[in-house]
């Protein structure tokens, strides 16, 4: 799936609306006036684009995993240094 298709799906999702609300709340928490809806949308889409580009890079080239092992319980948590994906393993 292309980046543009993924962005279009994101913009139609509930997650996009939640991100817009969080962005507006963040402005208010900082004591700033909330920008117009168009500016909020552009900011949210820009952030989503960066995130999706990184995720797609990991899908194409593979994740850069860092392991945090818990040998006492036989578990490992893998975190991608590039996109932030997390995998939990039981061994």
Image: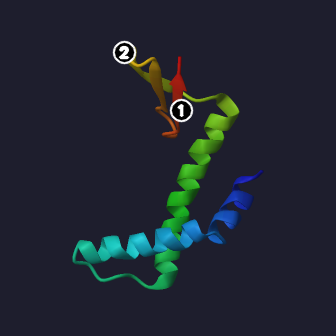
Label 2, label 1: how far apart the Cα atoms are = 18 Å
Display colour scheme: rainbow
**x then y, percent, for residue 68:** 40, 23
Q: Which residue is mark 1?
A: 87
Q: Residue at x 63, y 28 (%)?
A: 62
SS of the residue under disc 2: loop
Name the mark nearer the viewer: 2 or 1. Answer: 2
Task: Please give the name of the residue rendered at 69% of the width and 34% of the height, measured from the top-left corner.
Answer: 60
User: Crowding near pointer 2: few (<14 within 10 Å), some, many (20+)?
Assistant: few
Please give the name of the residue rendered at 66% of the width and 62% of the height, measured from the top-left corner.
7
Residue 3 position (above or below residue 58): below
| Side of 50 relative to 34 (left or right) | right
- Kindly give the residue lying farthest to the left in the view shown: 31
- Indicate which disc, 2 or 1, sits on the residue closer to the N terminus: 2
Query: Which residue position holds label 2?
Result: 72
Q: In the shown orientation, is residue 30 left or right of residue 16?
A: left
Q: Is residue 67 above or below residue 14?
A: above
Q: Is 72 or 29 nearer to us in this picture?
A: 72
Task: Determine the residue positioned at 46% across, 76% down.
Answer: 40
Q: Position of residue 86 (x, y in %)?
A: 50, 36
Q: Nearer the viewer, residue 18 or 90?
A: 90
């Amino acid at each position: 799936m292309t980046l543009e298709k993924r962005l279009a799906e994101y913009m139609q999702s509930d997650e996009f609306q939640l991100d817009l609300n969080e962005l507006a709340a963040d402005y208010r928490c900082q004591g700033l006036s909330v920008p117009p809806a168009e500016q909020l949308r552009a900011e949210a889409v820009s952030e989503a684009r960066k995130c999706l580009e990184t995720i797609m890079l990991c899908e194409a080239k593979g994740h850069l995993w860092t392991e945090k092992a818990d040998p006492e319980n036989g578990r490992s948590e893998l975190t991608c240094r590039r996109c932030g994906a997390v995998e939990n393993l039981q061994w």
